[in-house]
Image (cartoon, rainbow, N blue to C red):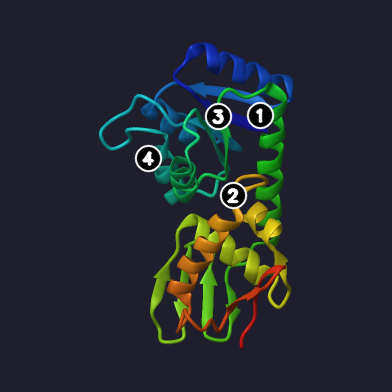
Amino acid sequence: MKILVVEDDRVVADLITFTVRRAGYEAVMANDAVSALRRWQEDQPDLILLDINLPGTPELKDGFAICRYIRRESDLPILLLTVRGEEDDIVNGLEAGADDYVLKPFSPRQLVARIQAVLRRANARGSARQATFSVKGLDFNPKLREVRLANGDVAALTSLESRLLEALMLNEGQVLTIDDLISDTWGAGGGTSEMLRQLVRRLRAKVEPDPANPRYIHNIPGLGYTLKIS
């Protein structure tokens, strides 16, 4: 498997590349936004390790912008590397389409473990993914991140909303625990119960006829959430 390492600090880039190759992956490098997109298109990697703070252009000014650009074209796994550990920065990265993030400084073992986990989740999603998911009055296209409602309206979902809805629809009628949904949506350790609650609220606002009285996404107190028609 091939991993694209996008990092403008040469010392850090060399360390990451060494770690990736020692773990058995092929590595290619880019040190700015323009070369990152060129490498992505030419080398067709299986995963991107993407630094947030990168030199770029007004249109591609940082790793968030690169992530959004690639996500419009591809479901390629993207793992953000960042020193910015504030919740807003992490949420912005995941909303931009990243699959996970690693805070700097990190150990080589932690980085390899996160890479392996992201690749496992991506492979599992690819194996399970359907063209569309449907329940009465709700048709979801995960590739387009769109939901067609019973009244004919189409709701566009963010990356996080799409991941959450896909997990619920893949397990229609089953109760998924809060930990399960956090893992499916943000990756292990990547979210909190409060972040999940807020995400459910935003998703309900887009897909429920009456968000205050959910028809599809139900809370099971003390356990988690389930998707079923009430």
Q: CA distance from mark 2 to mark 3?
A: 25 Å
Label number found at residue 21: none
The local crowd at label 4, few if under 14, some if 14 to 19, many if 20 or more residues have their Cα within 10 Å, is some
In the displayed structure, would residue 5 be above or below residue 98?
Answer: above
The local crowd at label 3, few if under 14, some if 14 to 19, many if 20 or more residues have their Cα within 10 Å, is many
* Of callouts 4 and 2, the N-terminal one: 4
- Observer-nearest of 74 and 208: 208
In the rendered structure, the answer to whether residue 187 lies left or right of residue 23 reads: left
- Splitting the image into 4 quarters, where does residue 196 fall? bottom right
In the displayed structure, would residue 113 be above or below residue 211?
Answer: above
- Splitting the image into 4 quarters, where does residue 105 fall? top right
Q: Amino acid at mark 2?
A: Gly
Furthest residue toward front: 222
Q: Amino acid at mark 3?
A: Leu
Classify mark 3: helix, strand or loop.
strand
Q: Mark 3 sits on what residue?
A: 4
Classify mark 1: helix, strand or loop.
helix
Label number found at residue 191: 2
Quadrant containing the N terminus is: top right
**Which residue corresponds to the image point at 46% horizontal and 66% vertical from the top-left?**
202
Q: Mark 4 sits on what residue?
A: 65
In the displayed structure, would residue 163 be above or below residue 62?
Answer: below
Q: Are marks 2 and 3 in contact (CB under 8 Å)?
A: no
Q: CA distance from mark 4 to mark 2?
A: 22 Å
Classify mark 4: helix, strand or loop.
helix
* Of callouts 2 and 1, the N-terminal one: 1
**Horizontal and vertical percent position of residue 217:** 58, 76
